[in-house]
Image: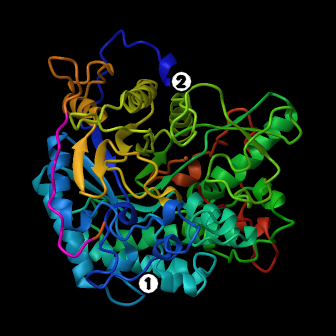
Amino acid sequence: MTASEARPLTAVRQFPPGFLWGAATAAYQIEGAAAEDGRTPSIWDTFSHTPGKVFGGHTGDVAVDHYHRFRDDVRLMKELGLTAYRFSVSWSRVQPTGRGPAVQKGLDFYRALVDELLAAGVRPALTLYHWDLPQELEDAGGWPERATAERFADYAALVADALGDRVDRWTTLNEPWCSAFLGYGSGVHAPGRTDPVAALRAAHHLNLGHGLAVRALRAALPARAEVGVSLNLHEVRPLTAAPQDVEAARRIDAVGNRVWLGPMLRGAYPEDLVADTAELTDWAFVRPGDTAAAHQPLDFLGVNYYTPTLVSAPGGAEPGMADGGHGGGPYSPWPAADEVVFHQPPGERTAMGWSVDASGLYDLLTRVARAHPDLPLYVTENGAAYEDAVGPDGSVHDPERTAYVHAHLEAVHRAVQDGADVRGYFLWSLLDNFEWAYGYAKRFGIVHVDYAEQTRTPKSSALWYARVARTGVLHAPEADGARTADGAAEAVPVQVDAVPGEAVPVPVEAVPVEAVPVEAVPVEAVPVEAVPVETAGPAAGGAAGDGAP
């Protein structure tokens, strides 16, 4: 179902009381101040400064200068009626070497941000890791090395000690699939390595780091705090019902989804993933007790969704994409599944080339809810990039984005009606920003940013979303409240003065995870049982290990 095919709203769509209406960002994409107050380079600083890695040679050195303008940005959140804001902490701003004591100036920035949010009535949702590993840890081996998982737990404890008295919702990792397989497999993300075995090792140590961080957070946080993880679970669909296409979907599901869901939710890697990757590794890097450590009770699962994944076996008549729309490049982010062909579904597309299909979000949420009925869910990322244009009057009218968000919120509402315990929605993104390898060429924000002047202008999608957030009712896109009497889009520019010296995926609940079966994400694929660590790998303690998208 595309946005244009979404069923008409014949009845009021009222979301449950207390449903969180949020927007999300990430530290390197918005903060800027890359070398201020003790912050040192992360892998994204290094990657973006490497010629040819990022479109146009763009970097996040300044980004949208949120470090200096956060109070204005929080004021904007309040004006838009947001009840929650999901942000990430820059590890190298808090712990520049990835080791040792915290830098208080770094923590003070996040203390001030959280205090500002609370004063504005916006609930903070903190993500510890959104891809910006301190460069010094990468120089020591990065996520393929076990020590990085241990350092991550130390970092989690530092942040929890500083902010645990005022932040109630904590996420360990955001989209570890991207960290592992785009960062160490295809190389289109930082640190830019292209080694499938290193990618699988990274996936395991991200799983381990997640579990160790959960333990550290539990030890430091008040009992009221909620701890979870955000996964970009792939809604994998075979091109046809032919057995070879179903098998292709199973392989992508294994390395795209169950590499995380196995360890995090069941304490074991799937047997089929281990078999698929046997020619690459014997998984000896998985030590006894690792998957038990990764398998920690969680209070919620964050689901990030943008578009479904359509795959087939090689040899079909229709040419496909090599990587599933993850940035191109000669190397595959799919270890042991690099022959699978990805296809572009027909219909509408975003500026990223991704198909617009809200049915994938509905299918993903309801399937997760059936497998884990006691696990609360949040949509922690959902949104779209479009070619936004500033009108002659300074306004930005983006009906395509409004239609996209409307269709996906309608899918969330249907999922809630059908029994999914979805408790909030975080739109990606609050602000136009540094879009990783695409630099500033792609705009996901509901607030337009003039990167030269750092002026913020809410787009018409923001004003429509504000009405939904304030009422809890899913209004039709044309009833966006963002119109003047003559029908033009109403702009709300927010000018922020320049600062001197600056240039311009499956949920898991607290009890008991072991008793809840894990479904394979593709509907058509036959679920494959996970196997205990002891039987999945060599006798010396190597076991099959799952990674996360």
User: Is 362 on the left-hand or right-hand side of 381?
Assistant: right
Residue 324 in percent (x, y) is at: 67, 46
- Residue 91's place in the image compared with 380, above or below, is below
- Residue 86's place in the image compared with 356, above or below, is below
- Give residue 98's mark: 1
Circle 1: residue type? Gly
Quick one: 202 or 39, which is closer to the camera?
Answer: 39
The N terminus - image quarter: top right
Residue 444 in the magenta stretch? The answer is: no
Quick one: 303 or 266, which is closer to the camera?
Answer: 303
Circle 2: residue type? Thr
Mark 2, residue position: 2
Quick one: 313 or 188, which is closer to the camera?
Answer: 188
Task: Provide the major secondary structure of the magenta segment.
Answer: loop
Q: Which residues are magenta?
A: 491-502
Residue drawn 50% across the image and 61% down it: 56
Q: Few, some or many C-alpha atoms within 10 Å of disc 1 (few <14, some 14-19, many ≥20)?
A: many
Residue 250 in percent (x, y) is at: 76, 44
Residue drawn 42% across the image and 87% down it: 97
